[in-house]
Image (cartoon, helix red, strand yellow):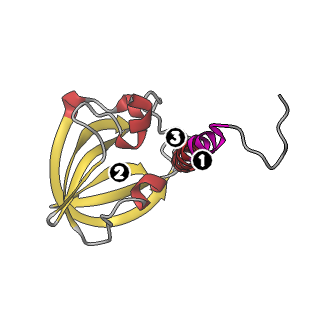
Amino acid sequence: MVFENNISRPGDEIMKRIISVSIIPIIMISFITADLYAQQFRVSKNTIGWGAGSKYNKMYNENTVVFISGKVVCLENISPINGMTCCQHILVKIGNDTVSVHLGPVGFMESQAIRITLNDSLTIEGSLIIFDSNPVIIAASLKNGNETLLLRDDKGYPLWCRQEKD
């Protein structure tokens, strides 16, 4: 049986509706997936050397967790280990002592609502380690006024690596 171009077969309208209803969600899912992938790439390219299993993150020791409170006297970006992207590093004055604290990769820190500035009074929880022959705290969380910023979970797993964990 031959059909002319202007004559439709039975069910053609139903097929057209099914196709149009099916294609719209597929296109939307494709755009959402592409955007999520792009966001993950932006985060990951800014966290080179900061993966959960990296040499640096393996230094975090939940058995050496300490709590300190003090005032920020220095705020800078440093690369803890050659080849790593920079992290936010602060010096916190506690009485007559100054403590070095590594917060997290700059890209991650800049994406947070909490901003750390000079003279902020912070309470910090983190792992006290010896890094390059000096005591350093790898921060797990910090409190600035009424705001709390979580950087790691209770086992020390970095929150900027959550997509690796899932």
Q: Residues within 10 Å of mark 1 (few under 14, many from 20)?
A: few
The quarter of the picture where the N terminus appears is: top right
Disc 1 versus disc 3: distance between alpha carbons?
53 Å
Q: Is residue 55 left or right of residue 97?
A: right
Tag 3: Cα neighbours inside 10 Å, few (<14), some, or many (≥20)? few
Region of the chain picked out in magenta, as a range: 10-20
Sequence-wise, which precedes: disc 2 or disc 3?
3
Q: CA distance from mark 2 to mark 3?
A: 14 Å
Query: Which mark, residue 81?
Result: 3
Residue with the mark numbered 2: 103
Q: Is residue 38 visible in this depiction of the protein?
A: no
* Secondary element type, mark 3: loop
CA–CA distance between discs 1 and 2? 49 Å
Q: Amino acid at mark 3?
A: Ile
Please tell me which residue lies in front, 57 or 91. Answer: 57
| Numbered badge on residue 73 | none
* Residue wearing tag 1: 20
Residue at 24%, 69% (x, y): give it: 120
Left or right: 106, with 97 as reference point: right
Query: Given this view, does label 1 or label 2 mark the residue nearer the observer?
Result: 1
Q: Residue 123 at x, y = what percent? A: 17, 56
Q: Nearer the viewer, mark 1 or mark 3?
A: 1
The location of residue 121, given as percent across then percent down, is: 19, 66
Amino acid type, label 2? Leu
Dominant SS in magenta: helix
142 vs 102, nearest the viewer: 142
Which is in the foreground here, disc 2 or disc 3? 2
Whether residue 15 appears in magenta in the rendering, the answer is yes
Query: In the rendered structure, which amino acid carries the disc numbered 1?
Result: Ser
Q: Which numbered disc flags the more N-terminal residue, 1 or 3?
A: 1
